[in-house]
Amino acid sequence: MLERIDLVSDADGFAFAAARARPKGPPLGGVVVLQEIFGLTAHIEEVCERFASAGYEAIAPSLFDRIESGFHADHAPEGIQKGIAAVMASPWDQVAGDIQAAVNALPQPRYVTGFCYGGAATWVAAARCTGLSAASCFYGRLIADLLNETPRVPVMLHYGARDASIPPENVERVRVAAPDSPLYLYDAGHGFCREDSSDFDQTARDLAMTRTFDWFARWR
């Protein structure tokens, strides 16, 4: 069952919203689920519920609440520009502090995953946040620009082989920089895990999520 909670950032004490889903029984651990540029969407809530169904407590922090309470951007060009502006206005120190608050609110062992912008934020969290056991990054375009951030926990990476927004050379840069991190290419485009995306691919989504569940269980 999904509920709204409040968290307080480790970065600056700012209070912000989050979505939380809890399993029916004792949790196997906790997972931070990090949003795309569009805010806490039905897709991110569904991912939280998917983890809860698998036995994890999941929290998705609303990373753009400083910009707009209950931030939401649609997929029209204006909405995409709104989301991009929110990314540009959110320094990584601040984002890492918000993620740390979500990590601290979860039972151990704790993991982090995220999609697109959230995939890059997952990489940053793996490098900066404490108390994590593993991470799984989904099509994080900005990761190639964050290779100076060295993850301190095991990281798995997922990309669409037909993702026009992430050049193959960027994926290769990540592969070379993180040779010990499993990196998977799927026969899909960008956003293949989001059901309302034109690039949604259930086969790729299910395989990537299964790999993520297995990855987290490995580091339990």
Image (cartoon, rainbow, N blue to C red):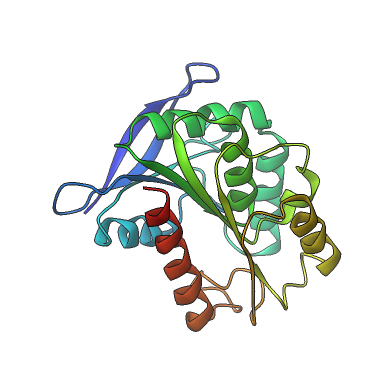
Q: Residue at x 75, y 59 (%)?
A: 175
Q: How many marks?
A: 0
Locate residue 97, reporting x and y percent.
Answer: 54, 26
Camera-side residue of 108 and 71: 108
Q: Residue furthest right?
A: 169
Locate residue 3, reporting x and y percent.
Answer: 26, 45
Q: Please state if 161 lies on the left or on the right of 126 as rendered.
A: right
Q: Residue at x 55, y 47 (%)?
A: 154
Q: Please state if 24 lies on the left or on the right of 86 as rendered.
A: left
Locate residue 100, reporting x and y percent.
Answer: 48, 30
Locate residue 90, reporting x and y percent.
Answer: 66, 33
Camera-side residue of 95 and 137: 137
Image height of 203 relative to 115, above or below: below
Quadrant for residue 45, please give it.
bottom left
Tell me if I can see residue 48 in this picture.
Answer: yes
Camera-side residue of 143 and 46: 143
Tell me if I can see residue 34 in this picture.
Answer: no
Camera-side residue of 187 and 190: 187
Q: Residue furthest top?
A: 13
Instruction: Quarter of the image for the N terminus: give it.
Output: bottom left
Q: Residue at x 32, y 37 (%)?
A: 108
